[in-house]
Amino acid sequence: MTIDQYNFAGKKAIVRVDFNVPLDENGNITDDTRIRGALPTLKKILNDGGSLIIMSHMGKPKGKVNAKLSLSQIKDAVAKALGTEVEFAEDCAKAADQAKALKPGQVLLLENLRFYPEEEGKPVGIDKADPAYDAAKKEMKERQKEFAKTLASYADVYVNDAFGTAHRRHASTAVIADYFDADDKMLGYLMEKEVKAVDNILSDIKRPFTAIMGGSKVSTKIGIIENLMEKVDNLILCGGMTYTFAKALGGNIGKSICEEDKLDLALDIIEKAKQKGVNLVLGTDCVAGDDFKDGCNTQVCSVMEIPEGWEGMDAGPDSRKAFADVIKNAKTILWNGPAGVFEFDTFTGGSRAIADAIVEATENGAFSLIGGGDSVACINKFGLADKVSYVSTGGGALLEAIEGKELPGIAAIRGSKK
Ligand code: AMP
């Protein structure tokens, strides 16, 4: 079932969205992209004559009520975006009466789902090493089912439009789907777009396929790096992981970020790339800083010869050129993770060079997909988001999908591939 085929007239729809928006210290929304992203789905339901029960998480309250993460803070913004009043349910598990009273066109926003440990389904306050952990986990899984069943009881139809959490088997993202018939559960428009973007990358790869992986650490990206090695022609590794590679290759990296226990892994990656015929592109020079601060003193040096007391904080000019040359020739591009400490204006140059090259390749017909919070923040900072093919709202979910893993949130609706 697709959302376009479904007529919501007279139906109550419970919709999982990602309203995990950033708030300032006064509870004001600083970036409403995620609310805007969900509007096509929410408006389709209201315009059809359905009523809406909206549910989301915000932050990581770890199963406890936390006023700073209450979704009541965004109720007015949601009402404004939808152009209609929004009611609020303070207790997700006791919203049956409010849901029942909804008339076509009316909207109910549930409190932060993660105030309930059942949402994530992980036992709280017990260590994994504790002998009682397995029993506690089993009990929590049962409670998770009950919680999902309660949420499901509020509505006739379930829509999942939260791609950012699709890689998690939570009550509201996957378990809830078990309580709806196949014709009464579906992906929302945003999810459909995300899935299509991933399919575009995986099913019909126009070559050369170039992936750019940056960010701080190699350890958190190793799964996707190994998997990409099976698919890409060029793999650019940049950002903080550059220095783990440089050290593994015998370089002096000063006080650059480095995962000492991943030096062998770095050499393995280099070897694997050779075996697979993947063109692995590593930075050769960097912009080093003498302090982890914006506006600190900088110098350009080889990644193999960073002076004591200095740290590599951005890709240098030779690296930028090497990255850009490869990117400009690509026909399929995936970018995850910045090339430097882009939060500091002094060190945005490498990421900017990557973004500019991606834009140029896209203008020349490449399909470019940008995902993961920091690369998306980069592309937004540079004002280039509408000049690439697709900017994903998912970080972990996007990478897992590209790794070829089945996302529980999608499998729960479409049925398992296995
Ligand atoms: P990740 O969460 O692993 O994608 O990493 C993103 C973070 O990596 C950003 O906050 C960047 O500031 C950081 N980063 C990128 N390059 C470096 C570097 N050379 N040294 C330290 N941090 C870096």
Image (cartoon, rainbow, N blue to C red):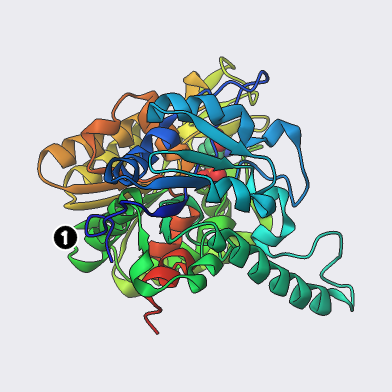
Secondary structure of the residue carrying numbered label 1: loop
Outermost residue on the bottom side: it is 418
**Image x and y of residue 339, in percent:** 44, 38
Q: Quadrant of the N terminus?
A: bottom left
Q: On screen, 87 above or below 349?
A: below
Q: Is residue 196 left or right of residue 191?
A: left
**Image x and y of residue 295, in percent:** 56, 14
**Image x and y of residue 377, in percent:** 44, 32
Q: On screen, 97 above or below 82?
A: below
Name the foreground residue: 237 vs 393. Answer: 393
Q: Is residue 37 left or right of residue 142?
A: left
Q: Quadrant of residue 265?
A: bottom right
Ligand number 1: quarter of image: top right
**Image x and y of residue 90, in percent:** 68, 40
Residue at x 32% of width, y 39% of height: 43
Kind of residue at badge 1: Arg
Task: For label 1, count other residues whose C-alpha is less than 10 Å away and answer few (under 14), some (14-19) or many (20+).
Answer: some
Q: Quadrant of residue 22?
A: top right
Residue at x 70% of width, y 73% of height: 141
- Residue at which label 1 appears: 207
Q: How many marks?
A: 1
Q: Is mark 1 within 8 Å of ligand 1?
A: no
Residue at x 67% of width, y 35% of height: 70
Name the foreground residue: 186 vs 90. Answer: 90
Name the foreground residue: 312 vs 355. Answer: 355
Asked if residue 216 shows in the view, the reply is: no
Name the foreground residue: 406 vs 219. Answer: 406
Q: On screen, 272 above or below 151?
A: below
Q: Is residue 405 left or right of residue 122?
A: left
